[in-house]
Image (tube, coloured by chain):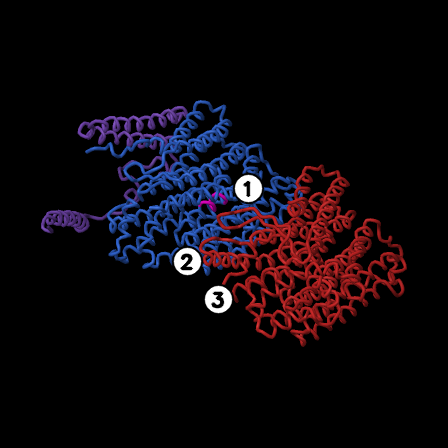
Amino acid sequence: MTNLLSIVLWLPLLAALPLALFPRRADAAIKGWGLFFSLVTFLLSLKIVLGFQEGIAGFQLIESVPWIPQWGIRYSLGVDGISLWLVMLTTLLTPVVLLASWNSIHKHPKEYIIAMLVMETAMIGAFLATDVMLFYSFFELTLIPMYLIIGVWGGANRVYAAIKFFIFTIAGSLLMLLGIIYLGALHARQSGGVPSFAVQDLYGTALSPTVSTLLFIAFTLAFAIKVPLFPLHTWLPDAHVEAPTGGSILLAGVMLKLGTYGFLRFVLPYFPKASLDYAPILIALAVIGIVYGALVAWVQPDMKKLVAYSSVSHLGFCVLGIFAMTQASIEGSILQMVNHGLSTGALFLLVGVIYERRHTRLLADYGGIAKTMPLYAVCFVIAMLSSVGLPGLNGFVGEFLILSGSFRTYPGWTTVAATGVILAAIYLLWLVQRVFFGPITNEENRHIPDIAWNELLALAPLFVFIVWIGVHPNTFLRKMTPSVEQLLAQMSNEKPQEKVMTASSSTKDSGLRTQDSRKAVSR
Amino acid sequence: MNLTPLLEAHWINAILPELVLCIGGMFLILFDAFAPKARSLTGPIAVVIFILCAWSQRFVAVGTFFGGTYEVGGITRVFDITFVLAGILCTLLSADYLEREGITGGEFYALLMWGTVGMMMMAKGLDLLIIILGLELLSICIFVLLGFQRRLPVSNEASLKYFLMGAFATGFILYGTALFYGATESTNINVMARWFANPDVTITPLLTVAFVLLMAGFGFKLALAPFHPWAPDVYQGAPTPVAGWLSVAPKAATLIALIRIFHAMGPVLPQTKWMTIVAWLAVLSMIIGNSVAIAQRDLKRMLAYSGIAQVGYMTIAMLTINEDAVASIAIYTIVYALMNLGAFGVISMLAKNQNDPQTLDDIAGLGWRRPFHALALAVCMFSLSGLPPTGGFVSKFYIFRTAVQSGHTGIALIGIITSIASVYYYLRVVYYLYMKESAEGQTRIDGGIFATGALAISIIGIFLIGIWPTPLFHAASYAAHLLLAR
Amino acid sequence: MTHTFIPVLIMLIVALGVGVVILSLNRVVGRHQRNPSKAAPYESGVPLLDTNRKRVNVRFYQIAMLFILFDIEAAFLYPWAVIYRDASHGNAGMFLFGEMLVFILLLGVGYVYVWKKKAFDWK
């Protein structure tokens, strides 16, 4: 299949179109149709992994046809080590979400499935696009279905949350659009009037320091809002608390990664000088986010809000890893994006499960439910431990790589960030203790039905990958190594000499990832 | 005295579309007068006439006609298509609207056609007097169309307001033209261009006054801030399809006329502050339009203010006249016609007393009552706010790209920032459509086959241009190239 | 050049002067008596039959408008007729004739329309 990427990209959308004609009553048929096609998409996306050749840094499985030739915009797709696992995460999470919301969406299920499938296409498109304008189109397209998912199927205060989410993100991305236009215009001038928006073509654009800084700010703002970085994170808890379970999973699992992915794909290689200059600020914000998110999560009375703030904390690690700019930290970041998608996705799903049954998310309403829902308690503890970073589960690998990599370039901030890991253990373990153990204080908790088959089925693949990444991360790491090396090589033209040394020497250093990467590199 | 040179060969081909519309309009009023019983047929007949007009574009002769006062070229064809498109959409929407309101009449469509002829004259006029003539023909038709619901006080108010303001604006334009004539000794744009191209030309304060007068007049017609206050009142009172048409087509005609004038002035613009004035108009329009629209609950008033902002965006592209500027404006007007008429179209279907405002509450929960109509409105809103993959995104991108390439990054930045604000009020419509429950006794949506067809055309057009804009770009940039290659 | 306008100036001054003199003479010489019948809108001695702010049937306006419309349009025929013979050389004659035919045709369409719309009927 030469058009594999296109097929994976458009299949969900094409499956969504005939859904509009389904009769409203055919509830099961609608859900089955949506689930079936999202599963087919996942299976097809496995072929991407199989067809992905290790040891190649650039884009693979490339497809490219002119889209708007007058402006040099092409419909071009490709995967590399940075985007591969994020695409897989998206195709994995969508069927999980559809399965998890099988019984929980009572209002307009048809439109919900359509929105989810459109969302899937938009997110895959953003990761696969190798043309900046194509990326931007998908990047903004994700907003529309998510706005509707939060606003229509969300909680009590959903409209406020939906509009806040939309306005925040679009404010950043519109500024980035201006930045893209400016960058494209500069490139066209420098290349003798041949416009192009291909990701790689724009790498070589010569920028004056002022322009570089301004464009850096425009791009960084857009992605920082999306991640979200510390002072810009206020939309996230609102959006998560109000969003339906499925929306939360996709929002935390995939959409936030568009921000960190954008840093890696655009900000670092396009503005290496400015990135280096402003890295301390971003790292400071990331570390503040880590600690702040963890502290706020600690005191949350609402389980979903707690998980939402833990996202702020975890995504802080990703940003820290990216701007520390070492091989280990960036690989750790990419892995942590996937990890966060898996573990937080599982946590949101589990919070949704219990909310379905009791219609409250307040910690105070629970206690001792491990007795009534033993299977549920087991699942929750696994997801929680993955999020905490227990060795042997995925979270540990990602966080360890980030911290060990970042320690080389920013030891001080990294030390502070490491407290985030401890804080995570505190607030998550405390959460488990308060919800699951102790005496049953609330009579209503005595007869909660345990986790259902569809929810268990939805969780199963997440747990498989949680363990897989924890036990054998090299399956995943070795595919991203060449792309990350290339990214750092692009950066190193601008780097002061000693820092290049650190960056390239990191592969030779000790630590967990050395053995893995040795194997990968020496092969 | 010899009058023959005024009639070049193929002159009849040059004005074929105009002739089709003129004769079609006359046919319609006679049809209405002779067969009042078959009045409901006038709408479909009008659509056929508009399609005939579009088809007649195939036989149009290209060149300059009537003694150098009338230029037919690629760009006028593109704009003709915009005018005809707006006419067709408005006719389709009106067919059901007029029927429901019980005011069907052949005169309505005839006026629409003659107004379109006026716009075509504005687009093709190579002489300020022809442009003014077209403008007046258009304005007179608009006066009557606005007051077509003559039993409604709001409709009369709209008509009278537009009449007073329009007459005032035309006065300004005429006075400006007179002053330009005094300096350049001609009202012909080509002759004026030669005069401006003379390196010895000095820009007297009188010429600046003339330019300001001209911009004030055209600013009224475009509803550019600070000449905008008529727009919300007039849109609110006008029959809704007419409001949609008014917000689109006359603006397009005025813009192409302005492009010709600005292009003629091109050589002297660097030594004047004239474009700074225009830039300020654009900035003011974007800021006022987008910020006041947030406060509106009346849908038509909101769209009026949004229209003020949209014209502001288009004006950004005009600050430097080059091929991209012309092409981007041409494309923006087409997309704008599709999305604005689509939005007004859904509003026109709200079956309620037309004297009352059509507010956001009327469309609450529409998404679950009438999915297609709600989808149409939502698509138009997303397109107006410039989100991909709609035509609104592509055209807005083109505008901002043109501005950045011409070095107007600062103004483009203001445009971007104000359009962030605009997202709020466009989204609020979507919020009412899908996230509000419809109340008891909710306003009905009453759309017949024609109006629904118009919405379908809008949606398809918006997505088609958003996803596959290349053919349109080819046509527009080629036409723009021909216009500017002198 | 300027002196050719002196007669106009004299004319202006004389006109102004006559107006002012007559009006002020009236004021100075005449006797002033105020009474209700003098303050009435019509001073012809007959008492008012009805209020003067009376609605007039819209048909009057309609007829007046149509009259002005066709009257003014007919007035366009005169200048055309005056120059037609001098201006018509070769093709120009046909052109001018055609122009007038189109003009009359437009008038005719308007006339038929107004007629069929029963705007000429008084009822």
Disc number placed over residue B280 in the picture, else none: 2
Q: Residue at x 39, y 47 (%)?
A: B165
- Number of residues whose C-alpha sits closer than 10 Å to that of mark 1, classed few (under 14), some (14–19) or many (20 or more): some
Q: Chain of mark 3?
A: A
Q: Please name the amino acid that badge 2 sits on.
A: Trp
In which quadrant of the rendered image does the C terminus of chain C lie? Answer: top left
Q: Chain of mark 2?
A: B
Q: CA distance from mark 1 to mark 3?
A: 38 Å
Q: Chain of mark 1?
A: B
What shade has chain C been given? purple
Disc number placed over residue A405 in the picture, else none: none
Q: Nearer the viewer, mark 3 or mark 2?
A: 3
In front of the other: A206 or B229: A206
In front of the other: C74 or C82: C82
The residue wearing badge 1 is B464
* Chain coloured red in the rendered structure: A
Q: Residue at x 44, y 48 (%)?
A: B230
In front of the other: A289 or A475: A475
Tag 2, which secondary structure? helix
Residue A493: horizontal and vertical position, in percent?
A: 56, 68
